[in-house]
Image (tube, rainbow, N blue to C red):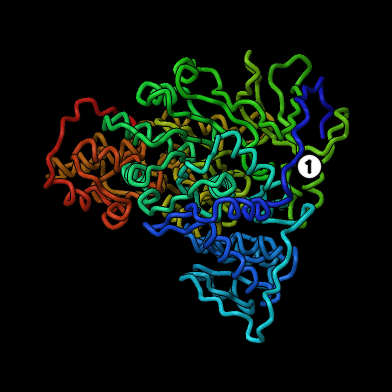
Amino acid sequence: MPTPQAPVRVAAPAPPPAASVIALLEQVAARTPEAAALIEDGTVTSYRTLWRDVEAMAAALLRDGVRTGEPVGVTVRRSAAGIGALLAVLRAGAAYVPLDPTDPPHRLHDIVRGCGLRRLLLAAPLPPAVAAGLPVRTIEPTPTLAPDPAGAPDPIVDPPTGDPLAYVIHTSGSTGAAKGVLVGHRALATAATALVEAWRITPGDRMLSFAALTWDTSGEETYSSLLGGATLVIDRRATDGTVAGLLAAVADHAVTVVDLPTSFWYEVVEFLRLTGRPLPPSLRLVVIGGEEVAAGPVRTWCALVPDRVRLVNTYGQTETVLVTHQAELGGAAGRGLPDGMPVPIGRPLPHVRQLLVPTAPGSPIAELYVGGPSLSLGYQAQPEATAQRFGPVPGAGDERMFRTGDLVTTGPDGQLGYVGRVDRQLKVRGHRVEPEAVERALLGHPALVAAAAYGVDAAAGGRHLAAAVVPRAGATVTGPELTGWLRERLPGHLVPTRWSVRAALPLLPNGKVDHAALTAADRTRPVDAPDGTGTAGDGAASEGVGAAGGGGARGDGGATENSGDAVVAEVASIFGRVLDRAHGPDDDFFDAGGDSLLAARLISRLYRRFDVELTFVDLFEWRTPRGLTALLTPARRTDDATEPRHG
C-alpha cells in the first residue's frame, strides 16, 4: 500500500442493518404477504408464495446434505425459479456460486475446483467434464419438492447471523484465471438496504430485471426490489437485444425503475433521438453504471426526457458490493455538463467510507480507497492478493479498505469524477477487463510472437476491446481465426472485437509497448480500413486494422462494389456505421465484431430508416445485410436525411 499524501476522509457510516437479506426478506413477507414479489410472463408470485418456495427449496437442500457456509454451484436464468434458487441457498445457510454455462469448460472447471464445490443446482446443463461426479438438483422447470419421506419436520435453520459467506462472484485477474470475490451476508444486506433508501424504493414500485443472474449487478435489482417490498418484473422482451423490446416491457408492466449498463443506456438515448418516441409514463428512475459516462449523451437525454425522471449514475466494484457512490444527472444537472470534464460518479452512500490518496503532493488527482461494512471478505484462496488490495492504509488509522485502482478528482460541489486507472484495467460493456489476461491467452497461439490488448472509444459512446498481434515469420493470421481461437479459452467479454496484424508493436523508449500509440492509430484509421489479416514481414500487415470479421472487396461506405442492389448496399452502409468499419453485403455481423449492444444500435438504425421493428432473433438468423434486407424491403421507408455518418 502506498503512503497517503494528506488523505481526505468522509464521515463514518451508519450502523449496519439486519445481518442478512434473508432475515429482511422474511420481514417483508410477513408484513405484506399478498403483495406481488415477482411477475414473470404474466404470472404473479406473491411474497407469501415466494417465501414458502424458498423455505421448501432450502429444506430440500439441507436434506441433500448442504452444510452451513458451503458454496453451492448454481446455473440460473432470469426467472422466478432462478431467483428463488439463489434465495434458497442463502436460506439454507450456504453460499451460491453463479456458473455461466457459456464460459469455456476449463474456466468452469477451475471455478468448481477452486471453490471446492460439492453439489450443483442447474437450470441449464454444464459440460459433462465440469459436472462429473457432483450431485445435481435440477431447478427448472420448477421442481415439486416432496416432504421428507420419514415425516420428520423440515430441517430448516435460522437465518444466518454474523457475517458468513453469501456468494462468490468470479472476475478475471491479470493472469486470466478466474478470481473469486467472497461476499458476506452483512455486506450484502448493508449494500442492498442502502440502495432501497438511495433509490427511494417503495411497495408501489416495479423494477425491471435486466442483468443476468450470473452477474453481481443483478443483486442491485433483485435485492433492492425485494427488500423494498416492490415487484420485480421479468419480461423476455426487455432482454431481447432491442430498445423497442425494453420499452414495450416497461410500458406493459408499468415499470417504474430500470437499472441499465451505461453502454446499453447509450442505445436507449440514440433510439429516443432517432425515433422521437417518449419514455413510458410510469418510469420514474433510470440507473446507469458499469463504466464512465460521456457528457454528450447525458445532455441529449436531458433534452428528450422530462425532468421528473431521475437519471442516476452509479459507481461500485465487485469487491465493495453493489453500489458505493451515485450522482444525480437528470434535469438541470445533466444539461449543464461541459465537454472535456469528467461526468460525476457522485458522493459516497451513507454506509461508505472513502479515502482519497493524492498521486503527488498537491495534485488534484487522487486514488480512491473504499471502506465500510459493505466491503467483501477478499479473494478466494488468494491471501496475497487480498492483503494487497484490502490491507489497512498506513497513516489512515490502519482501517481495512479496498484499493480500487481508480483515479478521481473532486469537483467544487464535492462530487467525485472518474479520470482513469493506476493500471491498465478497462471497462468494456460493463465488464471488467484485464488486458494482460487477453495478451497472455493470445501468446499461447502458435502463430503469434507478440500481442497487445487495449481499449478504443466507440463513436457513439462505450468502448471496444482491441488487440494488435505480431505473427511469427511466414505465419498468417486473421481476425476471425483469432476470435474463434480465443472464444474456446476466455469468456466472451475478454475476446477483442477489433484486430490489427502488425510487423512489430510500437515501443516506448523504455522498451515497453506503447499502448497509447496503438489506441491513437485505431482511432484515426478510416472507416474502410482493411480487415485484420496479415503475414509477418508484410508491409500492409503492419498497418492492417479492422474488426473480427473479413469480407470481400469493399467500396465507399462498406458496400461491395457492383453489388447490383441499392437497398442491400444501403443496409450494408448502416451495418458499417454501427460497427465503425467497412462492411460488405455478405459479411456476418457477429463475425465482424457485433455483440448484443451493437445489435441494439443496428436495430434502432434500421427501424429509423425502414420503419420495421426487428428483434435480436431476426439479426441472429439473418446475419448479413443481404439476408436482412428481405425483412426490410416490404415496409415503408422513411426519410433518412438526418442519419449521421457515425453511430
Judge left or right: residue 588 versus residue 6: left
> Looking at the figure, which quarter contains the N terminus?
top right
Judge left or right: residue 350 versus residue 612: right
The answer to whether residue 636 shows anywhere in this view is yes
Image quarter of residue 346: top right
Image quarter of residue 523: top left
Q: Residue furthest bottom?
A: 150
Camera-side residue of 160 and 604: 160
Residue found at x 70% / y 63%: 94
The answer to whether residue 502 shows anywhere in this view is no
> Where residue 368 appears, x then y in whole percent?
71, 30
Residue found at x 36% / y 40%: 579
Camera-side residue of 646 and 475: 646
Q: Which residue bears the numbered disc 1?
A: 390
Query: Please, what is the three-letter code of the amino acid marked with disc 1?
Result: Phe
Judge left or right: residue 509 versus residue 446: right
> Where residue 364 appears, x then y in whole percent?
69, 16
> Where residue 576 appears, x then y in whole percent?
30, 39
